[in-house]
């Protein structure tokens, strides 16, 4: 009898333990899902806000011809487009389905950059510029409409991020003109393809030849193992999100959960070579505790660890306690601007939150650099005497024909404005002049 009571007591105790453990696990999972949902909501709201800003600023460009005011407006468009792209990359839209939206924002950014450059030289926009801006304004209204519609679906509860995360083929919102939302965006932007100039130093990003994308094709399981080579944290779980095929570089995609943390990484590994193409962690960074120099050092250390040595910081943006640095390959003192890697670093603890290697994978190779025909002193003597030279170096820059040019890079100042002047080391010709603008969000060159 006593043994029976003991057995019953043990069973009851085990039942209570199972209930408590289950309740704790359920609460932990709910907390995790709520944290992820809050991060997605925040990123999506930010993206929508910046896209709304783009539409408003594009409307303003329709009615001003003053170069100074136009340049200011176009710079705002450039900034908002870049921020919208950053936030859209942090939420679980299907990479293939979202690619044209990102491309549209990228080219809005590049075109506003180009026109702002004209304005800074007091050159008024011409009829063709205004016609292009009018088209962009029209497309931006479409994008704003469908994203606001998707926002309503999400916040009304008829669509959840969990559905998007687990089923990227889900109908995202009500139909617009009998076409679902993202199909509508894609078909609208099909008309737009080829309209806009790609902008300074961005021509190389979509080359057909992927110079650094070498090696054998790997399987999804092999790609899953590769993920562990790029995230230096205690990984709880790696979940496949599928293979993205109809894109510039084919990738396997994964979600990565971290042990004892609400954080979640989104990772893309290339099918060819098993290289890291993109990684994002959308956690909120609450405080700025370390300097930009410390964050930059963390970025360099990370790139060295994952197989990208000899990278040098060039330009940066800073927002919400996160520093995003563009690193270029340093070939024995020659800065190769086409070989770009973008790294996102927390200014709270130096954690690497994101990386994009597209420019590097497209362009990097062992360049045979010829000896310059024109000396640096001769190149310098041909510069405008008003330019007060602050620093000088050597660089490889892309040119308009899709090739590359070996140049001397002179950073200088005229009155209160800073410039970068690139002089061809073979011909002594000025290849490019960029103006450096320090903005609240980082350094802009136009």
Image (spheres, grey):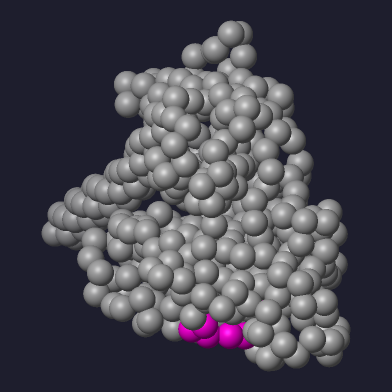
The residue positioned farthest toward the front in the image shown? 385
Q: Is residue 326 left or right of residue 260?
A: right
Which one is in front, 382 or 61? 382
- Residue drawn where x is 31% and y is 78% of the image: 291
Residue 277: % across, % down: 64, 61
Which one is in front, 267 or 167? 267
Residue 296: % across, % down: 44, 78
**Total numbered labels:** 0
Kindly tell me whether residue 43 is visible in this rendering.
yes
- Residue drawn where x is 25% and y is 69% of the image: 288
Q: Is residue 19 left or right of residue 407?
A: left
Does 117 appear above or below 364? above
Q: Which region of the structure is painted magenta?
A: 389-396
- Residue drawn where x is 33% and y is 58% of the image: 440
Q: Is residue 394 magenta?
A: yes
Which one is in front, 393 or 201? 393
Q: Picture quarter containing residue 398?
A: bottom right
- Residue drawn where x is 81% and y is 58% of the image: 402
Location of the C terminus by quadrant is bottom right
């Amino acid at each position: 009898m006593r043994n029976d009571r003991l057995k019953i007591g043990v069973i009851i105790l085990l039942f209570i333990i199972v209930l408590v453990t289950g309740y704790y696990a359920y609460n932990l999972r709910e907390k995790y899902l709520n944290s992820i949902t809050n991060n997605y909501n925040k990123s999506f709201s930010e993206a929508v806000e910046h896209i709304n800003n783009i539409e408003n600023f594009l409307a303003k460009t329709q009615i001003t011809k003053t170069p100074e005011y136009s340049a200011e407006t176009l710079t705002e468009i450039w900034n908002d487009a870049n921020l919208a792209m950053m936030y859209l990359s942090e939420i679980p839209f299907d990479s293939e389905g979202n690619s044209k939206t990102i491309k549209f924002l990228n080219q809005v950014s590049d075109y506003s950059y180009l026109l702002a450059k004209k304005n800074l030289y007091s050159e008024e926009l011409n009829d063709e510029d205004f016609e292009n801006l009018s088209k962009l304004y029209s497309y931006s209204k479409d994008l704003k409409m469908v994203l606001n519609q998707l926002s309503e679906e999400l916040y009304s509860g008829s669509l959840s991020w969990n559905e998007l995360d687990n089923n990227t083929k889900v109908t995202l919102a009500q139909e617009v003109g009998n076409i679902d939302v993202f199909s509508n965006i894609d078909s609208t932007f099909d008309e737009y393809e080829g309209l806009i100039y790609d902008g300074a130093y961005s021509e190389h990003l979509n080359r057909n030849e992927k110079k650094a994308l070498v090696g054998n094709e790997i399987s999804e399981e092999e790609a899953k193992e590769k993920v562990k080579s790029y995230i230096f944290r205690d990984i709880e779980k790696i979940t496949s999100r599928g293979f993205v095929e109809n894109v510039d570089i084919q990738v396997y995609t994964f979600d990565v959960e971290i042990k004892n943390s609400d954080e979640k990484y989104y990772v893309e590994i290339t099918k060819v070579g098993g290289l890291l193409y993109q990684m994002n962690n959308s956690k909120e960074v609450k405080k700025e505790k370390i300097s930009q120099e410390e964050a930059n050092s963390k970025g360099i250390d990370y790139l060295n660890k994952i197989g990208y040595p000899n990278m040098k910081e060039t330009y940066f943006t800073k927002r919400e306690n996160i520093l995003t640095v563009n690193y270029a390959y340093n070939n024995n003192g020659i800065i190769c601007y086409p070989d770009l890697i973008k790294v996102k670093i927390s200014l709270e603890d130096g954690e690497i939150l994101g990386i994009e290697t597209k420019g590097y994978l497209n362009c990097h190779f062992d360049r045979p650099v010829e000896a310059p025909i024109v000396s640096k002193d001769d190149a310098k003597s041909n510069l405008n005497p008003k330019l007060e030279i602050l620093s000088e170096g050597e660089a490889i820059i892309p040119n308009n024909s899709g090739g590359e040019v070996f140049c001397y890079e002179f950073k200088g100042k005229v009155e209160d404005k800073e410039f970068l002047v690139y002089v061809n080391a073979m011909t002594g010709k000025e290849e490019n002049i960029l103006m450096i603008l320090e903005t609240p969000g980082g350094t802009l060159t136009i």
